[in-house]
Amino acid sequence: MTAIAPDRARIGFCALGALYLLLAAPPVRSWLEATMSGHMLVQIPLLAAIGFAACRLLGARHQERLLAIAGGPIPLVVMAFFASSWWMLPRALDDALAHPLVEVAKFVSLPTLVGLPLALAWRRLGIIGRGFVWTNFISMLAVLGWLYIAAPQRLCNSYLVDQQASAGWLMVKLALLLFAAWLGHLFVAGPPVGNPRAVHGP
Amino acid sequence: MSAVARSVAVTALVTVLGSGAFWWGTDGFTAFTAETARRVDILRAPRPLPAAVLEDQDGRVFNLDDYRGRLLAVEVIYTRCTTICNSLGMAFRQIRDRVPAEALGRDVALLSISFDPERDDPASLKAYGIAHGADGEHWRLARVRDAAQLRALLEAFGVVVIADRFGGFEHNAAIHLVGRDGRLVEISDLDAPLQFAAKLVETL
């Protein structure tokens, strides 16, 4: 792994911090949270992505240390799985809108408990591990999307039924797209084992 | 500790903590939506209601507290609603018809509260009442004129109201039971009015 130059890392952190503050700014927050799709498919993934990108800027040594403390990639993937599932619960979305403390918890936990652990674990995962994470995520997205389309009543008190259905359709489409992209990537790029950037221990 | 042992130990810890969080956060894997959560919550801990001044379909002003000592069924509506409030109105009528005549008014009352005080003036409330068979005495229709009181009341009931694109509202609909002590004791689904009525009659 090539070390990231400190000034590049600094610029990166500043950019991520700015994006984070932008997402947290009340007008942007209420704009994204006004629709279920904006909340679930833009704000939440972006928060996780910020954590993922921030981890990459930490530098190899820090990442290795964090990985060692956590006990390798598997606990980290499990942690990301639990934390991301939590924010897929309809009542978690409602609670985030109704209680400021839950909203803060969302803004803190998505980068630190979803994005960061995934980024730490990702390079250590082989093709099987990555495939497991991808298929898990894609199938969860598709099933949840289907549930939102098929649910006869509102699952979130804060969103309209037609918003629920449109978020559901977007999730199903996104799942199909991701599946196609992942499959295509496997065939075109080949397995990531031979990836020269993969880390094989310190 | 070897790397593998550490991995297993931390994974186990994360799994236990994660499952624990889900157990706690979904009331024992039963309430995945905020709507179920509020029902479970109220069954466990009946909730006191804030004081509210209401105005009924004849312009009479009264307090929510005036119903203390009686069982009160409450639905939360707006009169222009063409969908779910009609089902609520029908459910309410079925409940009213199953309460023994001698208990009605003396020990049981019904109240439809509008969350749209701007447009639901006494005349609209009256029209809604007539359309659903309310008598205006044992089943009254009322609005809360004070915005802060209305907000507090909706919050206590757990009713979330959001404007839709057609000038109307979407809101979670249910039948609420307020006990003799003035606390919200149960929230029932509006497709099960008969069960609600049976329970009501049981507690008489």
Image: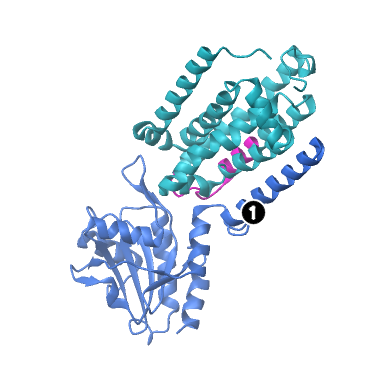
Chain colours: A cyan, B blue
B167 vs A185: above or below: below
- Mark 1: which secondary structure? helix
Q: Is residue A51 visible?
A: yes
For residue A125, side relative to residue A156 (left or right): right
Q: Is residue A155 visible?
A: no
Residue under the image location 68 percent in, 45 percent down: B14
Q: Quadrant of the N terminus of chain A?
A: top right
- Looking at the rendered structure, the kind of residue marked 1 is Gly
A66 vs A10: above or below: below
Quarter where residue B47 is shown: bottom left
The chain under label 1 reads: B
* Depth order, front residue of A55/B81: A55
B165 vs A91: above or below: above
Label 1 environment density (alpha carbons within 10 Å; few <14, some 14–19, many ≥20): few
Residue under the image location 64 percent in, 35 percent down: A142
Residue under the image location 52 percent in, 69 percent down: B44
- How far across and how far down the image is residue B59, in percent? 18, 67
Give the residue at mark 1. Answer: B20
Please provide the residue range marked out in magenta. A141-159
Q: Is residue A158 magenta?
A: yes
